[in-house]
Structures are given as structure tokens and as C-alpha cells.
Image: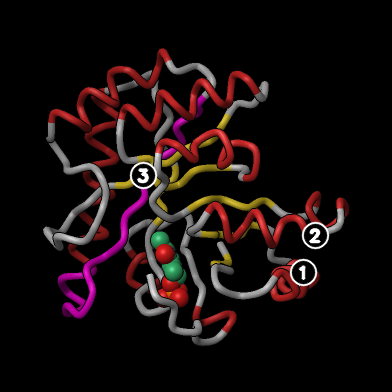
């Protein structure tokens, strides 16, 4: 996945011409603007997923704009996405974002938490969503060994959840960014999310 957040639509078009077709964006509003500048054939050549935290009140807009939501982190959000997908006659691919480190600023579902268990139990009833796997962001500023252990933990969790919820298809493991994608691939990543290494450094934004 080419992470095009903060970069202009022209960068997406150029990457697409070079054969990259899956993009990651982290803000609904930012991609809404970019998307409005893309021609229909350019849009048709790309699939764009949301990889940043989504507020429930933007769920409907996100369903219109994106081809997948890779940052699903609560049951209320899943319910909003499911209703919006039903209205748009879409079957929305989603990944569950898992929080494997206790950095306070980070969002995501905690393994073995009641919130994750409840979401997994209810997902089969949300028939307008199609869960495809798990996503995580490794902690910042830790050793390669710690990063790798985090990716391994996501794979082990996926295997456990797949065994416990056989009606869900959890094949995707979205893990690894510019600084750590080789470690993530070694631990079984199926979808690395690379921004800086493709597009260069991002301008500092007041987020
Ligand atoms: C920005 C971002 C990336 C890409 O990070 P790089 O280090 O620039 O490759 C990947 N995943 C998520 C969730 C991001 O927000």
C-alpha cells in the first residue's frame, strides 16, 4: 500500500502510472479534496483505504469515499459503517486495528479485551462489512527485536482469532511502514503501508 497522506493527488497519479494501485489515506476530509480533483478513469485505476482513526460521525462519508477501512476500532463505529454501507449498497472491506503497545496516544482494540471480543461476536451480523484481517502500528523508537515481537504478536493473535471465529476470514495482516517493513514481511505481513520511502518526507502538519 502506498501511503499518500499529505501528498498531492498528482503524487497518487504518478504512483498509479508506475503500477501502484492501492493507496492509504488517514483523513476523510483530506482525501475528499484530493478525490474531487481526480478524473473518473484515474479514480477507477486506484483503490484507496482509510488507515487513520475514523470518528463515527464521518462513517457515511468514509464509506462513500473509500474502498476499505483499515482502522476499525470499535463496535459503535462498525455499526455506523454497516448502516452506511447498506445505504450505499456496498460491501465494505474492513481491518480491525489492534493496539499492541501501551502508548497512550494510540487507538486500536486491545487483545483479549471485552471490546474486541464483543466486536468479533457481532461482526458476522453486520453483513454489509467484510472483515479481512488485522492492522497494527508498531511502537515508535524501540529496538528491532521489540518491533519484530510486536508483528509476531499480531500474527499469533490473528491465528488465535481465526481459530475461535471460523466464520470470519482474517487473511490480511497489515503491518510494517517505511522504517520496519522488512521485519513485518519476515513476520508474515500481507500488506505493508509505505509512505516516506516512496514519496519522501511529509511536511510537518499540526495534527
Ligand atoms: C503515515 C502512516 C504510514 C506510513 O508511514 P511511513 O513511515 O511514512 O511509511 C503507515 N501506516 C499508517 C497508519 C500511517 O498513518
Quick one: label 2 or label 1, which is nearer the N terminus? 1
Residue bearing the label numbered 3:
134
User: Are the two marked residues, 1 and 3, in contact with CB atoms closer than 8 angstroms?
Assistant: no
Residue bearing the label numbered 2:
38
Whether 136 is among the magenta residues is yes
| Mark nearer the viewer, 2 or 1 | 2
Residue bearing the label numbered 1:
13
Measured from the top left, where is residue 190 in percent x and y?
Answer: 46, 54
| Mark nearer the viewer, 3 or 2 | 2
User: Are the two marked residues, 2 and 1, in contact with CB atoms closer than 8 angstroms?
Assistant: yes
Measured from the top left, where is residue 106 in percent x and y?
Answer: 23, 58
Q: Secondary structure at mark 2?
A: loop
What is the distance, in whole Å, between disc 1 and disc 3 at their CAs? 28 Å
Q: Is ligand 1 less than 8 Å from the beta carbon at label 3?
A: no
Quick one: label 1 or label 3, which is nearer the N terminus? 1
Measured from the top left, where is residue 56 in percent x and y?
Answer: 41, 36
**Left or right position of 99 against 177:** left
Q: Quadrant of the C terminus?
A: bottom left
Is residue 185 placed above or below 71 in the rendered structure?
below
Residue 125: image quadrant is top left
Amino acid at each position: 500500500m502506498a501511503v499518500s497522506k499529505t501528498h498531492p493527488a498528482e503524487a497518487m497519479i504518478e504512483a498509479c502510472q508506475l503500477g501502484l494501485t492501492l493507496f492509504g489515506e488517514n483523513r476523510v476530509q483530506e482525501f475528499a479534496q484530493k478525490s474531487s480533483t481526480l478524473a473518473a478513469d484515474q479514480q477507477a485505476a486506484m483503490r484507496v483505504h482509510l488507515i487513520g482513526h475514523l470518528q463515527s460521525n464521518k462513517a457515511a462519508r468514509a464509506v462513500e469515499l473509500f474502498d476499505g477501512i483499515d482502522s476499525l476500532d470499535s463496535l459503535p463505529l462498525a455499526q455506523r459503517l454497516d448502516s452506511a454501507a447498506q445505504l450505499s449498497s456496498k460491501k465494505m472491506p474492513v481491518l480491525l486495528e489492534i493496539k499492541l503497545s501501551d502508548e497512550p496516544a494510540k487507538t486500536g482494540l486491545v487483545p483479549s479485551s471485552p471490546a474486541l471480543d464483543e466486536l468479533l461476536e457481532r461482526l458476522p451480523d453486520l453483513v454489509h462489512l467484510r472483515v479481512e484481517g488485522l492492522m497494527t502500528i508498531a511502537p515508535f523508537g524501540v529496538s528491532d527485536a521489540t518491533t519484530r515481537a510486536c508483528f509476531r504478536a499480531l500474527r499469533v493473535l490473528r491465528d488465535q482469532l481465526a481459530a475461535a471465529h471460523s466464520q470470519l476470514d482474517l487473511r490480511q495482516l497489515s503491518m510494517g511502514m517505511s522504517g520496519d517493513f522488512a521485519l513485518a514481511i519476515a513476520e508474515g505481513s500481507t500488506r505493508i503501508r509505505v509512505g516516506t520511502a516512496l514519496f519522501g518526507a511529509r511536511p510537518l502538519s499540526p495534527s
